[in-house]
Image (cartoon, grey):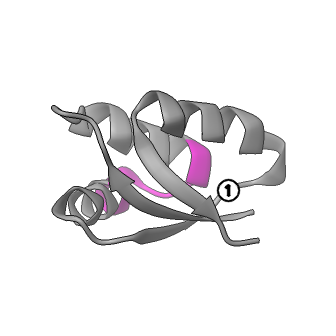
Amino acid sequence: MKLNLLSCDAQRPDKRAIVQCITEISNVGSSLAHELTDILLEGDAVDIEVEDKNSGSALRALRKLNVDYEIIE
C-alpha cells in the first residue's frame, strides 16, 4: 500500500518517534527516514510504501503521532 503523508498536526511533534515509525512501517533506513521526517515537518507531502501485512498498525501509529495521510493505493 502506498501512503502520502500530508502533514503533522501535533503542537510539538515528536521527531524521533516519527522517524522511528517511518523506519518500522516502510522498511527504509534511518537516514532516509530522518530526511523524510524533515520534509514532512517543513510542510511538504511525503510518499512511502507500506507492506500490506503492516497496514493496520501503520495507520494507527501515524494517527497516534497526529500525522495526516491519504491512501494512494
Dot 1 lies on which element?
loop
- The image quadrant that residue 24 belongs to is top right
What segment is highlighted magenta in the picture? 25-33
- The image quadrant that residue 41 belongs to is bottom left
The x and y percentages for residue 63 are 51, 35
Q: Amino acid at mark 1?
A: Val
**Residue at 18% in and 33% down:** 11
**Residue at 38% in and 70% down:** 45
Quadrant of the frame with the N terminus:
bottom right
**Residue at 29% in and 61% down:** 40
- The image quadrant that residue 13 belongs to is top left
Establish if 60 lies above or below 33: above
Magenta region includes residue 41: no
**Residue at 63% in and 40% down:** 58
Q: Residue furthest right?
A: 53
Characterize the local packing of mark 1: few (<14), some (14-19) or many (20 or more) Cα atoms within 10 angstroms.
Answer: some
Quadrant of the frame with the C terminus:
bottom right
Q: Residue furthest top?
A: 64
The x and y percentages for residue 48 are 55, 65
Q: Is residue 71 found left or right of 51 in the rendered image?
A: left
The x and y percentages for residue 47 are 50, 71
Establish if 59 lies above or below 35: above
Return the residue at label 1.
50
Q: Main secondary structure of the magenta part?
A: helix
Q: Nearer the viewer, residue 38 or 34?
A: 38
Q: Nearer the viewer, residue 54 or 9?
A: 9
The x and y percentages for residue 37 are 29, 55
